[in-house]
Image (spheres, coloured by chain):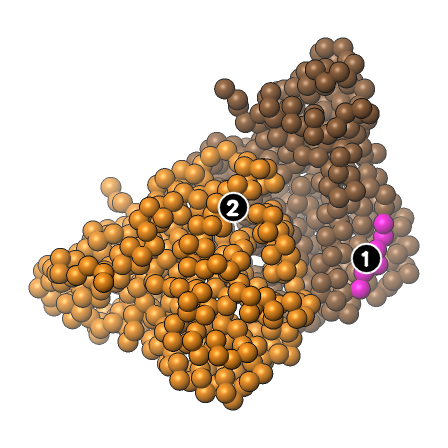
Chain colours: A orange, B brown
Amino acid sequence: MRKPRLMTPGPAPVPEEVLLELARPVIHHRSNEAKEVITEVTAGLKEVFKTKNDVMILTASGTGAMEAATVNTVPPGGKAIVLNAGYFADRWAKICKAYGINVVNLETEWGHPVDPQTVENALKANPDAACVMGTLSETSTGTGHPVEAIGKIVAKSDAVFAVDGISGVGAMECHTDKWGIDILCVGSQKALMLPPGLAFIAVSDKAWAKIDAFDSKSFYFNLKTARKKAKEFDTPFTPAHTLILALRAALKMIQTEGIENVWDRHRRLSEACQAGIKALGLELFSSRPAEGLTAFNVPAGLKDSQIRNALTAKFGITTVGGQDKLKGHIIRVGHMGYTDELDVISGLAALEMVLSELGHKLEPGVAVTAAQRVFIGKPARA
Amino acid sequence: MRKPRLMTPGPAPVPEEVLLELARPVIHHRSNEAKEVITEVTAGLKEVFKTKNDVMILTASGTGAMEAATVNTVPPGGKAIVLNAGYFADRWAKICKAYGINVVNLETEWGHPVDPQTVENALKANPDAACVMGTLSETSTGTGHPVEAIGKIVAKSDAVFAVDGISGVGAMECHTDKWGIDILCVGSQKALMLPPGLAFIAVSDKAWAKIDAFDSKSFYFNLKTARKKAKEFDTPFTPAHTLILALRAALKMIQTEGIENVWDRHRRLSEACQAGIKALGLELFSSRPAEGLTAFNVPAGLKDSQIRNALTAKFGITTVGGQDKLKGHIIRVGHMGYTDELDVISGLAALEMVLSELGHKLEPGVAVTAAQRVFIGKPARA
C-alpha cells in the first residue's frame, strides 16, 4: 500500500468533496443554473481576493491571466517595469517581449524579496511606464514579496500594479484593494483547492482606464470582452464549466473557515515547516519565505533526486526540485490549500527518516518536535 | 423525479466512467505518470484525427486553438480567406481583425455549405493569402461543409487550410492528412466526450513552414513553444491535467468502438433525427446537415422558447435555440459523442409529445417510427 501525498506548490491537493463535484453530469454553460454558479463564485472570489473590483474567470493556466494583464494594459511599444526576482517573475518579461513591450527589468537576487525602494526609483526614472509587474509568492524560490509596500508606491504613480498571485492568493494575506493591486492574477490549482484549468483576474478602475485607452491586439484574452460578459455573469467563450462548479464547493470551504483563518493556518504551517527544516540542520533558500511553500537547500553530499525519489518511494510524497539555475540546488515542499498541521508533520517525519537513511546526521524526531512546538506555542492572531 | 438529459451541440454528455476519472486525486503535471498520459492521449488523438502531424494540447476553449492557428500562421498585415458561413466561422474573421490581419470574407448564406468553387476563385484572386479558414461542422446552423473538396483546392495553393473541427471531429468523417487539413482545431466538450477546458491542434509540415517563417506576437498560444514541449510529451504551462486523464478514458472508449464505427453511428443518428423531424412536418434548417446536431425551423405559430422550455420542464431535456440572426428561428438538438439510438428516439418522442400538447398537429409515434425505420433499414457501411 502506498498513499499518494501531493506536497507540491501547485497543483495542490484537492478536497474529496470538490473532486466529487467534477464527477457530476455536465450542465449547459449558458443555462440559468450556470449563470447562478458564476454569480455565486464571483462574489466568493471577491471575498477571498479582498476586492470590490471586477473579477473575471478565464479558461486557461495562470499564465493566461498574466498575458491578459500585459496585453490589455500596455500597448506595443509601451513600457513596463518587471520586478524580476525568479523564474515566474521572469515570465512577465517574456510575455512583454513577445508582444513588443519595452521592459525595465528590475532584477533581484533569487530567494530575496524585492526592495520597494528600487521600485520607487524605477518609477521616478520611468514616468512613462504603464505597468509595474510583480509577484506575491514566487513559487520558484519560495519567496514572499512585500506587495503591500510596493502597492503603496505604485499607487502614487500613473502606472498600474499587476500582481501574479497565482501561488500566493489564499495562502498569504492579500488585500487587493487596500494594497493597491490594480490587476490580480490567480490560478485554480493552488490555495483555491481546485485542479488546474481556470485562471482569475481582478481589475481596478485605474487599470480599466488604461485598458479602455487603446485597442489591445487580443481576442481570447481581451479583457473588454470578458468584462462585458462578466457583467451578465457569463464568459465570452465556453468555460471549463465543471471546474467552476467545483470552485463553488472549494469557495464554500474557504468561506466556512474564513479567509483570515485560512491565512493564519498557512502562516502556522509555514512557520512550523521552516522550524522543522532548520531543526534538521538544513538551510532555507529564501530570506523571506512565502507561506504556501518552503524551499530549502539540498544538503552537501546529497543529490536532490536521492531525497525526492526516496520520499516518493517510501511515502508516496511528491515534491519538486529547483527550476532553471536552481535545478539540483533546492527542494520545494508545498503546504497550501487543503493542508493541515498533520500534513506538515507527516512531511517532516518522512523527510527525517529519508535523510537519516541517506546518512544525514540527525536526532530522530527533531523536525517533528520543532513543528509541534510552533503549533502549540503560536499565540492567537491579534 | 426528473432525469437531466443534455441534448445540446456541446457541451455533450460525458460518460460516467470519464466523469469518475475527474474525481481521482490530482497528480503532478510534470511527473513521469503525467508524461505517460500525454504520450498515450497524443497517440489516441492522432488516430481519431487521422493524422501523422504534430498534435498539441492547449488549456483553453476551442476558440484558443482558433486563435493559435490564426496568429501563428498569418503575420499582422497578412491576408486570410475566411469561409464565412455562420456564427462560429465569423469568429475566424473576428480573430483576424483583432490581430490586424486582412480578411477576404467569403460569405455563404447561413445553413448552406461553402461552394468549393468560390474558394478556388478566391485563391486565384488572392495568391498572397497565407491561410484559408473553414469549418467542418458549423454549430450555429447545423451545417456540414465539404472540407475534403476544399482541402484539395487549398492544397494546390501556397495557403494553408485551417479547419475549425470543434463540433465536427469525432462526429463527422474527417481525414486530416488525406483531405489536406493543415491546421485542425478541436475542442474537448463535443464528440470527444469530455467537459470543456481543453483544445487540441494538429499542425502539418506545410503549416509549420509558415509558422517558422516569422516571429508571431503570441505567448500563451505560441505554437513554436507548444511544439517544443509536445516533443517532450509536456506542455509549456500547467495544463488542465485532470481533463487530460479523463481524455485517456474517453479515447479508450472511442478506440474500442473504432473511429470509423463512431462516424457511422453519428451518421445513423443524424439521419434518424432528420427523418423524425421531417415526419413531424418540420423543416430542417440546413441544406447539408452536420452529423453531430440537427437544426430545425421553429414551426409557425409557436415560439422556440415554448418548445424548449416544455422539453426541459417535462423531460429534463436541454436544447439550444438560434444564435445571432437565427435567434428565435431555429432549435438545435445535439446527438454527438456519448449518444446512441435510444437517446435520439427519446428526444424525438419528447418533441412529439411537447408539440402535440402545444397544438401542433401530428400523428402520435410518427417521428419515433421514422427514426426506427432508419435504424432498422440502414445498410451496412460499404
Q: Amino acid at mark 1?
A: Ile
Q: In the image, residue A251 lies at what x, y percent?
A: 40, 48
Q: Secondary structure at mark 2?
A: helix
Whether label 1 touches label 2, CB < 8 Å: no
| Above or below, A228 relative to B23 | below
Q: In the image, residue A193 lies at what x, y percent?
A: 38, 50
- Specify the label residue A39 is tagged with: 2
Same chain check for tags 1 and 2: no
Q: Secondary structure at mark 1?
A: strand
Predominant secondary structure, magenta span: strand
Quadrant containing the C terminus of chain A in the rendered view: bottom left
Q: Residue at x 50, y 19 (%)?
A: B1
Image quadrant assignment for residue B131: bottom right
Q: Residue furthest left?
A: A363
Chain under numbered label 2: A
Q: Reply yes or no: does residue B46 show up in magenta.
A: no
Q: Amino acid at mark 2?
A: Thr
Instruction: Count residues near mark 2 (Cα–Cα under 10 Å), then give few for <14, some for 14-19, many for 20+.
Output: some
The residue to which callout 1 is attached is: B81
Q: Is residue B265 among what the camera can see?
A: no
